[in-house]
Image (spheres, rainbow, N blue to C red):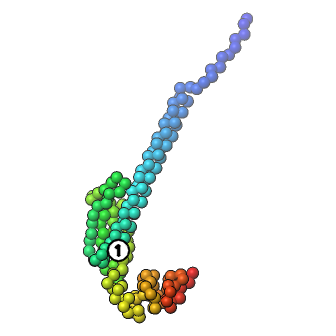
Amino acid sequence: MPLRRSVRARGFTLLEVLVALFVFAVAMTVLVQSGTHRAQNLDYLRDRTLASWIAADRITGIRLEPDGVDTGSRDGEVDMARRTWLWEAEVSATEDDTVRRIEVAVRLDEDSEPIARMTGFAPIPDVVADADADPDAEGGPCPGAVSPCWNCWWRSRSSRCSVRPPPRGCSRSPMPA
C-alpha cells in the first residue's frame, strides 16, 4: 500500500487577499490626502508671504508720499508673481498729532477675505519740521544734534535716546540693554 503524502496548500486565501487590498487602499487614500493638504498649505503660505510683502511695500510707499501722509482711504492693484493683487489702505490719526496709523489689507479678488493685514505708523513731515526748529519742544530732535535723530523723535516720551551710541551732540543717555 502506497503512502499518501498529505499535500498542504501554501499561499493566501481569498479573504486574506481582500483584507490586504482594503488596508492598502485605506493607506493610499490617507497618503494622497496628506500630500494634497501639504500642497494646499504651501500655496497658502506662498500667497500669505507675497501679500505681506505687498502690504509692507504699500506702507513704505504711503510713508514716502511727497505731500505727506493724509488721512483717508487708498486702494490699488499690484502685479506680483504672475498675479494681480488688490490692496486697500486706511490712514487714520492717532493720539499723537505727529504720527499717522496706516492699515493695509491685501487680497486676490474683491470678494475674498484679505490674505494679509499689516499696520504701520508714519510721521507727519510738517510737524517734525516744526519740532526741529525748537529743540526743547516735545518730539524734537536730540538736543544739540546736527540732524534730527529719528529714534529720539519717535521715542520722545522717554528721556533716553534709543540709539546706540547716541548721535553726535545728543545729551540723552542710551537705553539700557
Q: Is residue 149 left or right of residue 92?
A: right
Identified at 72% across, 10% down, the residue is 3
- The image shows a total of numbered marks equal to 1
Identified at 42% across, 87% down, the residue is 141
Identified at 33% across, 65% down, the residue is 105
Q: Is residue 9 above or below residue 171?
A: above
Identified at 39% across, 63% down, the residue is 53
> Closer to the camera, 99 or 150?
150
At label 1, counting other C-alpha atoms closer than 10 Å, the crowd grade (few under 14, some 14-19, many 20 or more) is many
Q: Is residue 156 above or below residue 88?
A: below
Q: Is residue 15 above or below residue 154?
A: above
In the rendered view of the protein, which quadrant contains the N terminus? top right
Measuring from the top left, give residue 113's x and y in whole percent. Answer: 32, 60
> Closer to the camera, 121 or 115?
121
Measuring from the top left, give residue 28's x and y in whole percent. Answer: 49, 39
Q: Can residue 108 be seen in the rendering of this structure? A: no
Q: Which residue is label 1 attached to?
A: 63
Task: Name which residue type carries label 1.
Answer: Arg
Snapshot quadrant of residue 103: bottom left
Instruction: List the single residue furthest toward the top.
Output: 1
Measuring from the top left, give residue 71's x and y in whole percent. Answer: 28, 77
Identify the element where label 1 is drawn. Answer: helix
In the rendered view of the protein, which quadrant contains the C terminus? bottom right
> Closer to the camera, 160 or 37?
160
Instruction: List the single residue furthest toward the front.
Output: 146
Snapshot quadrant of residue 112: bottom left
Q: Is residue 29 above or below residue 78?
A: above
Q: Can residue 121 be seen in the rendering of this structure? A: yes
Q: Is residue 2 left or right of residue 15?
A: right
> Closer to the camera, 112 or 47?
47
Measuring from the top left, give residue 95's x and y in whole percent. Answer: 35, 84
